[in-house]
Image (cartoon, helix red, strand yellow):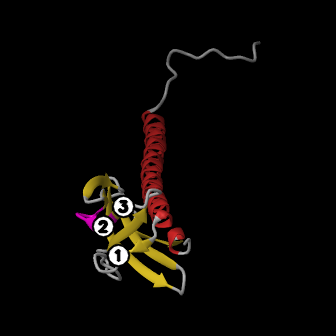
Amino acid sequence: MSLISSPSPERGFTLVEVIVYSALVAMLLLVIVQMAFAISGSSKRSNAYLDVNSTAIAAFGRFSRDIRRATDVDSVESTLDASSGKLVLEMKRDDGTDDVTTMYLEDERVKESFNGSYVGDLTPDSMAVSNLTFRVFRAATTTAVRIEMTVAPQDDSGVPALNFYGTYVLRGSYIE
């Protein structure tokens, strides 16, 4: 007698077994699909956070470069301590001539102009800047600019607006 029995032609799955197995497979597929959607949403939010942070890093890098090169802030032309700020920086070239760089908020974008000519946007179209505040601090021989900027993605990624801050000293303000 053999220990391995061969299936008889009458044997098969019962209707109850097929229904139970189908229900188990359907539940397993449902869990897998829900996990895929959760991972996709998490990835979308993570990318949106990265985009917001890289937007701020790029803008603050430009702020830092231009502010540190400046010799003075034009307080008359600048819009200071306001959420839709404008910063006008005066710079001196080696030959003694003056340059003027202006950074301002318009249409939810941070824009820059150089000597009255529009240079371009410092923030991409996919990001909305709702606050750009410049504050100027002056000491006896030094001038510093504090910047507050609020950035949020334009899409519905679920990422809230994030605030960024930076303070930079005008190197040209203490070099005589």
Residue 67 in sight from this viewpoint = yes
User: Which residue is depicted at the point 31% across and 55% down?
Assistant: 121
Q: What residue is drawn where x is 42% and y is 64%? A: 91
- Measure how far apart labels 2 and 3 are at the Cα level: 17 Å
Q: Position of residue 56 (x, y in %)?
A: 44, 61
Whole-angstrom CA distance, mark 1 to mark 3, is: 12 Å
Dot 2: within a 10 Å radius of its alpha carbon, few (fewer than 14), some, or many (20 or more) residues? many
Q: Is residue 85 left or right of residue 73?
A: left
Report the front residue among 61 and 52. Answer: 61
Q: Which residue is pictured at 43% across the width and 49% down the height?
A: 34
Would you say residue 109 sits in the magenta stretch? yes
Q: Residue at x 31, y 78 (%)?
A: 83
Q: Nearer the viewer, residue 106 or 159?
A: 106
Is residue 125 at all visible to an observer of this figure?
A: no
Q: Which residue is mark 3?
A: 99
Determine the main secondary structure of the stretch shown in magenta: strand
Q: Which residue is mark 2?
A: 104
* Amino acid type, residue under disc 2 in the picture: Tyr
Counting residues from the start of the chain, the first of labels 1 and 3 encountered is 1
Residue placed under numbered mark 1 in the picture: 74
> Which element carries disc 1, helix, strand or loop?
loop
Q: Residues within 10 Å of mark 1 (few under 14, many from 20)?
A: some
Specify the segment rendered in magenta. 102-110
> How far apart are labels 2 and 1 at the CA level?
13 Å
In the figure, 22 relative to 139: above or below? above
Asked if residue 43 lies left or right of residue 106, the reply is right
Return the residue nearer the eye: 164 or 3: 164
Name the residue type under label 1. Asp
